[in-house]
Amino acid sequence: MSAQPHKSLDSHLVKACAAEVGFHACGIAAAHHIGDYAALYEWKQAHGYNADMDYLTRYSEQRYNPSVMVEGAQSVISVLLSYNPSRLMSSSPRVARYAYGEDYHERVRRMLYQLIAKLREHYPSFDGRPCTDTAPVAEKYWAWQAGLGWIGRNTLIVNPRYGTWCNLGEVITTWPADRYDQPMENRCGTCRRCQQACHNHALAEVEPSSVSATNGAETSFPVLDARRCASYHTIENRDATLPADVRLSGYLFGCDICQQACPYNEEAPVGLDVTPERMGQLEELAVCDEQTFRRTAKHSAINRIKYTQLVRNRGGK
């Protein structure tokens, strides 16, 4: 990582470069410790809300403070990429929409490197660390800080234009920006459609006092109990059988129930073109053999699970 330069990044230029690469939105936040959200991470782990996903609290210092991950970090460039598909699966069981196309880790990471290369055309010594959710970064927090949306009651970033059908990415850099974006005000209001729609009651809210946080910008923290979440059980849970009291609601991989209920998703524009051929592959997951599954899952988020899990999930209610 290069030493901090004397000049600042032109924030308008950064956003123009992000758009040219293909991102649907971009914002920039000043790098800092995430404060109260660190306490929330600790609270969720202590109360079992992460189930067995211990990796969510590994490398906590890097997750809580970008300057630990990138020495001298000045800015976090946050980007958003819509995955709202042009076609939807008509059959049940089905997969979550974020898994329709290319693995978002590969797609977003490639685009982040393209963004860095584009910025070097204007700032030859520019350097930054690209991050997807495989790195210990508080992605939703930084998207909120960079003005890309707010953290809704479904615990996802809600963008007023693209809704919650969004993948996120970041570039952490030692370069300052000439202007930083401001966190977006929470616009959920009294709406609790996502919480009410979840068949497993996995979504809740916790008061700041419960996590020893002041939480000046929010009245409560939205939390997801992974132990009750269909997405967790269809993907992360590797047990031979699923809990009898957890409903999969017709999903083989992931779950979109809470997102489908969000009013900000009702008119969200298409962000991902899904070909008829790809849709046919997805539809076939309900009956395919292992060889076909491997072909369909290759370079897809679906590759996160094994064929035995797919078969197990087919039997879910």
Image: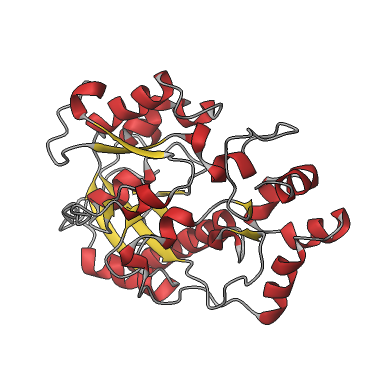
Give the position of the N terminus as an image quadrant.
Answer: top left
Q: From the top left corner, tell me how far across and down residue 4 is, in percent.
A: 27, 45
Left or right of residue 92, residue 29 in this image:
left
Of 226 and 292, the residue lying toward us: 226
Horizontal arrangement in the rendering, residue 225 relative to residue 71 (left or right):
right
Q: Nearer the viewer, residue 129 or 33?
A: 33
Q: Could one spot residue 178 in this view of the protein?
A: yes
Instruction: Name the residue rendered at 18%, 23% in the picture.
Output: 209
On the image, the x and y values in percent for residue 199 come to: 48, 46
Residue shown at the point (87%, 57%) measured from the top left = 291
Residue at 74% from the left image edge and 69% from the top image edge: 281
Relative horizontal placement of residue 4, taking residue 45 as reference (left or right): left
Q: Residue at x 59, y 59 (%)?
A: 99
Percent coordinates x, y for residue 158 in the rendering: 31, 57
**Residue 159 occupies which quadrant of the picture?**
bottom left
Seen from the viewer's position, the closer of residues 81 and 204 is 204
